[in-house]
Image: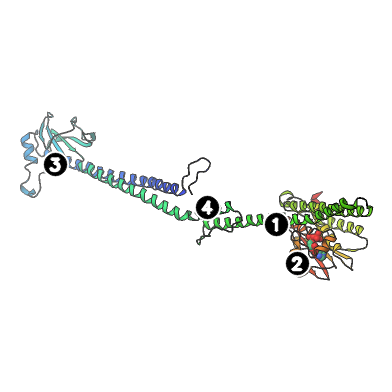
């Protein structure tokens, strides 16, 4: 399956499917990961900010106890050496904060530094308001907090405090998390791509079978290959079944076509041979013999008439196959047509007895084109007359079913043997070929009648007994209100 069609590059469905699933899972993962990542890092950041705030509060409280302007000495005593006494096991606050990557700087009232636990990176303006801000550092952002320090007992300003959290732990976690996310993302995309590819390979396997079958059939349309129908019941099973049915139908159609051509050429061969025979005879010695000349011309005329009828019937047959498309909305009052055909036949064959048994008490309308109904009735009545023997009687009947109207045509003639009952509706089929030919039959009448009736969603049935006669029944669905057609 690697051909180019319509100038476009062939891109396998499997590849498209794999790319689709990979992109889909990439998007979903990105959305979920981003949400998780941002909430997680926000929490980390809030924690760091909380730490800084807590540190500032603790130190300022400690410094407030000094109760006089801050100097290097008293600050050191208050903060760094605060290890003895009741808080024996407590480490100095400054050291604790430095361990936690915070830098503390303390200023006196004149804003001059008196103590610093590290090298300050970010200079900030010292004000009398407590402020915590996120500011730009040399490598990344840092949180800086600054506040005035007041003496505890008289609330006088004794100095300033600045604490800087360099966010080292935060950025370390941030980078780690980002790496994990990127790795997980790659894994998800790769895994979903591979999974998509494998799944599509599995699902599309029946398409390969269809492809192979089409390839074989396109080389030889009569080949008896079919797509293997998958066991599981899904769309592919439906496709394979439908495809096989389509192949069956197409091959049946091809067979019918070639059978039709065979049948037609076979049917034409006899009249052509007869005409040719007569012409040969005339050419050799018949021209001067008026009797031979007359006989030959008459015989040839009979055969040409037969060929003309044959051609007309073949045309009718092919048209009968399309009534469903061309005459779908035609409606006819059945009673009228049956009465008309009955009267015509009575006049045409005065030596026959025609009986019409009409059970209908109102006009009944069927969905059939008037000329077609007439054609069917003429074919059946013609046959009834043609195949009658001693008892020259034809019974017509007209009755109503639930939603159908039924027309019966019965004769008391030769009848049809049981084995031929189904076959008489086939093209060119004749029970007794010689007899039918003698009566001008081509074996197409019943197949035209059947196709016409079935084209209008009706049916035609036959009961017959050899020597006793036959009865044909046409059943047509009833439609609408007969008053509406005029
Ligand atoms: P044909 O033109 O030969 O009559 P049809 O298709 O009308 O062709 O009929 C096919 C064959 O069915 C006939 O050749 C004949 O053998 C048989 N058949 C049709 N109608 C009757 C009938 N009413 N009685 C006996 N045989 C019939």
Label 3, secondary structure: give it.
Answer: helix
Q: Is mark 1 within 8 Å of ligand 1?
A: no
Q: Which residue is mark 3?
A: 98
Q: Which residue is mark 4?
A: 211
Q: Position of residue 486 (x, y in %)?
A: 82, 48
Disc 3 and disc 4: Cα gap in Å? 74 Å
Using the image, determine if residue 342 lies above or below residue 158.
below
* Residue name at image x 94 percent, y 54 percent: 291
User: Which SS class for mark 1?
Assistant: helix
Considering the numbered disc 4 on the image, is that residue within a helix, a strand or a loop? helix
**Mark 1 lies on residue:** 259
Label 1, label 3: how far apart the Cα atoms are = 102 Å
Locate residue 363: give its quadrant. bottom right
Above or below — where is 222 with respect to 28?
below
Badge 2 marks a residue whose secondary structure is: helix
Is residue 251 or residue 400 the one in the foreground?
251
**Mark closer to the chain start, 2 or 1:** 1
Question: Separation of disc 2 and disc 1 at Cα?
Answer: 19 Å
| Frontmost residue, 192 versus 42 | 192
Q: Residues within 10 Å of mark 2 (few under 14, many from 20)?
A: few
């Amino acid at each position: 399956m690697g051909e180019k069609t319509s100038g476009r590059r062939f891109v396998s469905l499997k590849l498209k499917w794999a790319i689709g699933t990979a992109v889909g899972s990439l998007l979903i993962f990105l959305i979920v990961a981003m949400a998780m990542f941002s909430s997680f890092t926000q929490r980390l950041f809030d924690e760091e900010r909380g730490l800084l705030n807590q540190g500032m509060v603790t130190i300022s409280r400690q410094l407030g106890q000094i109760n006089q302007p801050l100097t290097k000495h008293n600050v050191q005593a208050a903060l760094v050496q605060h290890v003895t006494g009741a808080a024996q096991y407590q480490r100095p606050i400054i050291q604790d904060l430095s361990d936690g990557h915070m830098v503390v700087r303390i200023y006196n009232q004149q804003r001059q530094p008196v103590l610093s636990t590290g090298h300050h990176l970010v200079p900030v303006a010292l004000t009398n308001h407590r402020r915590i801000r996120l500011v730009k550092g040399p490598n990344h952002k840092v949180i800086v907090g600054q506040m005035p320090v007041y003496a505890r007992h008289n609330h006088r300003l004794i100095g300033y405090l600045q604490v800087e959290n360099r966010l080292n732990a935060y950025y370390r976690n941030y980078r780690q998390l980002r790496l994990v996310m990127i790795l997980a993302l790659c894994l998800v995309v790769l895994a979903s791509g591979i999974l998509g590819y494998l799944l599509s390979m599995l699902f599309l396997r029946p398409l390969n079978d269809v492809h192979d079958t089409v390839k074989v059939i396109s080389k030889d349309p009569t080949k008896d290959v079919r797509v293997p129908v998958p066991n599981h019941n899904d769309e592919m099973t439906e496709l394979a079944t439908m495809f096989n049915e389509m192949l069956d139908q197409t091959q049946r159609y091809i067979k019918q076509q070639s059978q039709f051509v065979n049948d037609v050429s076979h049917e034409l061969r006899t009249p052509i041979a007869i005409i040719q025979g007569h012409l040969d005879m005339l050419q050799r010695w018949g021209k001067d013999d008026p009797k031979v000349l007359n006989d030959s011309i008459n015989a040839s005329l009979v055969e040409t008439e037969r060929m003309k009828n044959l051609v007309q019937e073949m045309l009718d047959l092919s048209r009968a196959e399309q009534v469903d498309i061309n005459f779908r909305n035609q409606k006819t009052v059945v009673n009228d047509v049956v009465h008309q055909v009955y009267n015509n036949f009575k006049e045409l064959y005065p030596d026959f007895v025609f009986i019409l048994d009409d059970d209908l008490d109102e006009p009944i309308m069927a969905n059939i084109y008037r000329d077609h109904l007439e054609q069917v009735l003429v074919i059946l009545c013609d046959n009834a007359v043609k195949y009658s023997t001693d008892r020259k009687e034809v019974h017509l009947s007209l009755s109503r079913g639930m939603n159908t109207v039924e027309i019966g045509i019965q004769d008391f003639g030769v009848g049809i043997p049981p084995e031929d009952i189904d076959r008489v509706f086939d093209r060119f089929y004749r029970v007794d070929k010689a007899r039918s030919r003698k009566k001008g039959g081509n074996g197409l009448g019943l197949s035209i009648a059947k196709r016409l009736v079935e084209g209008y969603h009706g049916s035609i049935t036959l009961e017959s007994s050899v020597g006793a006669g036959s009865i044909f029944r046409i059943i047509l669905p009833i439609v609408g209100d007969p008053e509406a057609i005029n």
